[in-house]
Image (cartoon, rainbow, N blue to C red):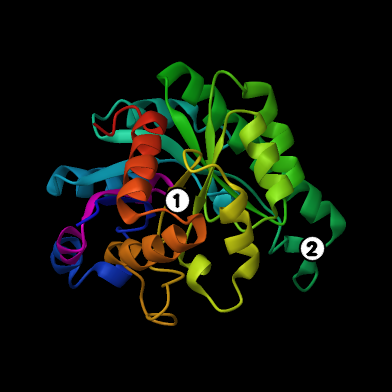
């Protein structure tokens, strides 16, 4: 059986409160050897660390999601530094920009609200990058409707911090822009969707050693589970489609993506 990693999961979410041990066991049975649970604020990050302590094959990423920026302290660096010291914390994030649900679109919202929100996201993103440099870790990048701003903000850190643009769904030209600054992309179950041809086109154009696989569970369950709760075991279905797109064997895809993950997450082991 070919071995794969789920490099982006949210195992601390309440979706898994009742059967997490079984979810982990199913992942192991499907050949998913390592799972990275991603924090979305400090409470979520601490839960991810606890899960990494509970399960040998689970690791943690700690940070503050841009969609939660309004709830973040003005300066998160001291707490980030402390969390990053934990032995199974392999990166910082997820961090970046999300302009999909701007406060200006809400009743009573104004363009000034949007500007303030974007400024707070930028400040939090910057702090992640600064701490990542200090800690010798990379960053898990979230961007939605904000690709150019995200890339521009990361670019000055090229050579010091790498990012993985998770759940990548943009065109090959944008993928190449990410790779040009030494960063990576990661693909989810969208690759299996009937309407996911754009993602498959980008996968086809991405070098075999420059991307990783993930579920982003509990979201984006691949075919044939689409519409249901996603879980790390489903990297198996994602890998089968990606191998077809790349015209390679599952073993070749396993070797490439697991090596890429180990290089990107230096504490993954």
Give the magenta range.
26-44
Q: Position of residue 18 (x, y in %)?
A: 19, 73
Q: Where is residue 220 in the image (x, y as percent from the top left)?
A: 46, 70
> Of the residues tagged 1 and 2, which is closer to the observer?
1
**Magenta span includes 43:** yes
Q: Is residue 113 something one can see in this rendering?
A: yes
Q: Is residue 13 something one can see in this rendering?
A: no
Q: Which mark is residue 40?
A: 1
Is 22 positioned to the left or the right of 35 in the image? left
Instruction: Name the secondary structure under disc 2.
Output: helix
Instruction: Name the secondary structure under disc 1.
Output: loop
Q: Which mark is residue 75?
A: none
Is 266 positioned to the left or the right of 200 in the image? left
**Magenta span includes 3:** no
Q: Which residue is disc 2 drawn over?
A: 104
Q: Quadrant of the C terminus?
A: top left
Q: In this view, does 65 lie above or below 1?
A: above
Q: Specify the quadrant of the image occupied by residue 256.
A: top left
Front residue of 144/27: it is 27
Q: Residues within 10 Å of mark 2 (few under 14, many from 20)?
A: some
Is 92 positioned to the left or the right of 143 in the image? left
Front residue of 60/112: it is 60
Q: Which residue is drawn at 79% across and 63% down?
A: 104
Is 154 positioned to the left or the right of 214 in the image? right
Front residue of 223/88: it is 223
Q: Where is residue 32 in the image (x, y as percent from the top left)?
A: 24, 55
């Amino acid at each position: 059986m070919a071995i794969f990693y789920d490099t982006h999961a949210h195992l601390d979410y309440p979706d898994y409160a009742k059967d997490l041990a079984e979810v982990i066991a199913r992942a192991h049975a499907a050949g998913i050897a390592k799972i990275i649970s991603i924090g979305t604020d400090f409470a979520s990050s601490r839960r991810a660390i606890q899960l990494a302590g509970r399960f040998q094959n689970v690791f943690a990423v700690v940070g503050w999601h841009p969609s939660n920026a309004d709830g973040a302290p003005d300066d998160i660096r001291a707490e980030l530094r402390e969390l990053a010291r934990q032995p199974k914390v392999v990166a910082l994030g997820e961090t970046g920009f999300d302009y999909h649900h701007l406060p200006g679109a809400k009743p009573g919202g104004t363009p000034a609200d949007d500007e303030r929100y974007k400024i707070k996201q930028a400040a939090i993103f910057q702090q992640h990058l600064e701490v990542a440099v200090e800690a010798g870790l990379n960053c898990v990048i979230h961007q939605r409707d904000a690709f150019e701003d995200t890339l521009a903000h990361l670019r000055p850190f090229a050579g010091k911090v790498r990012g993985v643009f998770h759940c990548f769904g943009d065109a090959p030209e944008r993928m190449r822009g990410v790779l040009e600054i030494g960063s990576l992309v990661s693909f989810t179950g969208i690759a299996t969707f009937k309407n996911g041809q754009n993602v498959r086109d980008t996968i086809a154009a991405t070098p075999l050693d420059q991307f990783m696989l993930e579920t982003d569970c509990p979201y984006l369950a691949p075919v044939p589970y689409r519409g249901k709760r996603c879980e790390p075991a489903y990297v198996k279905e994602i890998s089968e489609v990606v191998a077809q797109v790349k015209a390679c064997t599952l073993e070749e895809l396993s070797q490439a993506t697991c090596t890429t993950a180990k290089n990107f997450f230096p504490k993954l082991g």
